[in-house]
Amino acid sequence: MKRGGAAFWIGAAAFLALVFLSTQIVSNEYPFFAGYVILQFIVLSVAWSILGGYAGYVNFGTSAFFGIGVYTAVFLVKVAGAPLGVQILVAAGVGALLGFALGLLTLRMQGIFFSIATIALTIIIETTVTNWRFVGGAAGIQLQRPPVTAPFHSYVQMLFFVQALLVVLAIAVSRYIQNSWIGHGLQALRDDELAAECTGVPTLRLKLLACVISGALMCAAGAPAAMYLQYADPSSAFNLNYSVTVLAMSLIGGTAYWAGPVVGAIVLGTTQQLLTVTISSEVNVLVLGVMLVVFVVGAPEGIIGLIRKVRNGGEGKG
Amino acid sequence: MDLLLDAVIIGVLLGCFYAAVSIGLSVSFGLLDVPHVAHPAFLVLASYGVFFLNDSYDIDPLLAGVLITPLLFVFGLAAYRIYYETFERRGTDAAVRGIAFFFGIAFIIEVLIILHFGVDQRSVTASYIGKAWRLGDMRIPFRLVVAFAVATGLTLLLSVYLSRTFMGRAIRAVAQDEEAVRLMGANPVWIKQWAFGIATAVLGVAGALLIIVAPVEPTLDRAYIGRTFCVVVMAGLGSMTGTLIAAIILGVAESIVLTMFGASWAPAISFALLLGVLAVRPQGLLGRRS
């Protein structure tokens, strides 16, 4: 593990250096504008997989966490003109709280009932925000970007770099969880919750922990979106598309391994960005639906699962 | 006070309509355990079918709903066959992957509707749409009365079908104990497929009611995920009488909130009820199992 650990951190550092360098060299803003969305989805998918992949609890509340992240930022900007770092930190805190609440509320629900409860929570939160005049209500709210801080030349490039930092953070957390007792416990409870409980795995506490971590990361990923779009409205911030897109990315990549959601988010995110530019955003959703169905039916283990199968050459079935 | 009474009466009418759109899910999710989140998408699709027939051939929406019923039945048979072959037969994770699968299907249906009909709201024309009954100061839209009557009839019909006919009893038998049915020499998969077909076929008339009650748009199914699952879960999985009662509770609750707090709070009602039921009494009001 240790050698793999070093390789991972070198890779992460190289990735960040590359991202930073590109923001200094490339002056065209568009690649960052599009790339930001992909990075954002990587964070969301990785965070989703902590609960959805390792523990097998399919959370449709991604949009709730994302939207809460956006609106935490909006609130902070409106009240105190808080800087980006503060927005993200507070959003992560709120996300952790919300994750804790979700965990408590759904502690005894399993399978589809958990999923439905998370959809329910999303709509309830969305409706509450819609009725909250202070942050703009149903009509939404315009935001003004503050001047960009050095060494960045444009705000979008800075957001791109910040989101890249979040990517590294999310992957590091997810990777740590997978290799630690937390991940092993979560996997045990996914396979058989009762058996895990009987052998002494603290299933309820682990689920709560997964909800908290996953929620904090998702909210943190949502917070910069307010400044990215310079606008927020409830029906797009809490759009169910986020939930299903993130679910699709994780399933396409494969949920059993931390790299799965990363691969899935890159593949589907890039495809969607290309389609949005070349054709239309409707086709975008169509591709999302088709890929979701195709992968769930044809490759339940995702791309990572496919790669492993090819590598093992059909050995080790199961 | 009068306002409240109005709200309750409208709520009961609305509730019966909700029963009609949920009854299919009560069979597919309640009895068969299929995590059918695409049910509302099928419903909206049926509404567009009705719209198409009404718009191009000037057929009465209710009649159009009946006309597309056989088509939906076949569609339901096929959908269950695919679901069964890919998930139930393989066993593991059927519920979890099933939800993802049906969400994918729902999104595909949404986009296909958008590509074919556009994102605009669509409505149908018929002689009974737009008129209203006056009872004292109260104004009851006639379209709601029609929806109420047809919905009640549909719900009763399905509940009689499930309790009185041979096939209906077979469906309930499968829901109770699939293994026992297999041992009796019947094919549970075939019975479930039939049941899923029925659950989808009912959407023909339900879809007609949906577009009679209010204009439809391609993403309307998202609001109905909450309503239909709320009704089915609150009813206790698979109980037809429960479905009617739960739907009326939802209808009245929505109608009262609408009158007291305004339309912007309405979407949360069904989901709040659903969440409450799930947290407190997961087996529903008239639960099938603990």
Image (cartoon, helix red, strand yellow):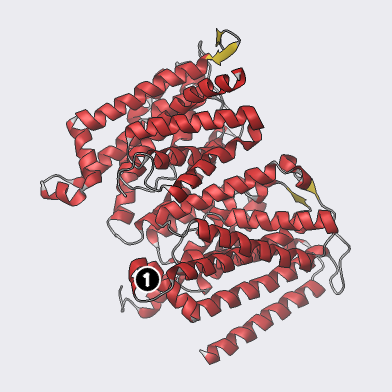
Residue at 43% x, 73% y: name it: A202
Q: Which amino acid does label 1 sit on?
A: Glu
Residue at 38% x, 38% y: name it: B235
- The answer to whether residue A61 is above or below residue A259 is above
In the rendered image, residue B44, in percent from the top left (x then y), is placed at 48, 34
In the rendered image, residue B32, in percent from the top left (x then y), is placed at 30, 45
> Is residue B286 among what the camera can see?
yes
Q: Which of A49 and B126 is in front in this view?
A: A49
Badge 1: few (under 14), some or many (20 or more) residues near its Cα, within 10 Å? Answer: some
In the rendered image, residue A78, in percent from the top left (x then y), is placed at 82, 53
Residue at 48% x, 71% y: name it: A206
Asked whether, in this view, residue B128 is left or right of residue B264, the answer is left
Q: Which of B245 and A221 is in front in this view?
A: B245
Which subunit holds the residue at mark 1?
Answer: A
- The answer to whether residue B21 is above or below residue A116 is above
- The answer to whether residue B95 is above or below residue A1 is above
- Where is residue B37, by image quadrant? top left
Asked whether, in this view, residue A145 is left or right of residue A55, the answer is right
In the rendered image, residue A181, in percent from the top left (x then y), is placed at 47, 80
Q: Which residue lies furthest to the bottom in this view?
A: A3
- Quadrant holding the C terminus of chain A: bottom left
Secondary structure, mark 1, is: helix
Where does label 1 land, which residue?
A: A197
Q: Nearer the viewer, residue B208 or A35?
A: B208
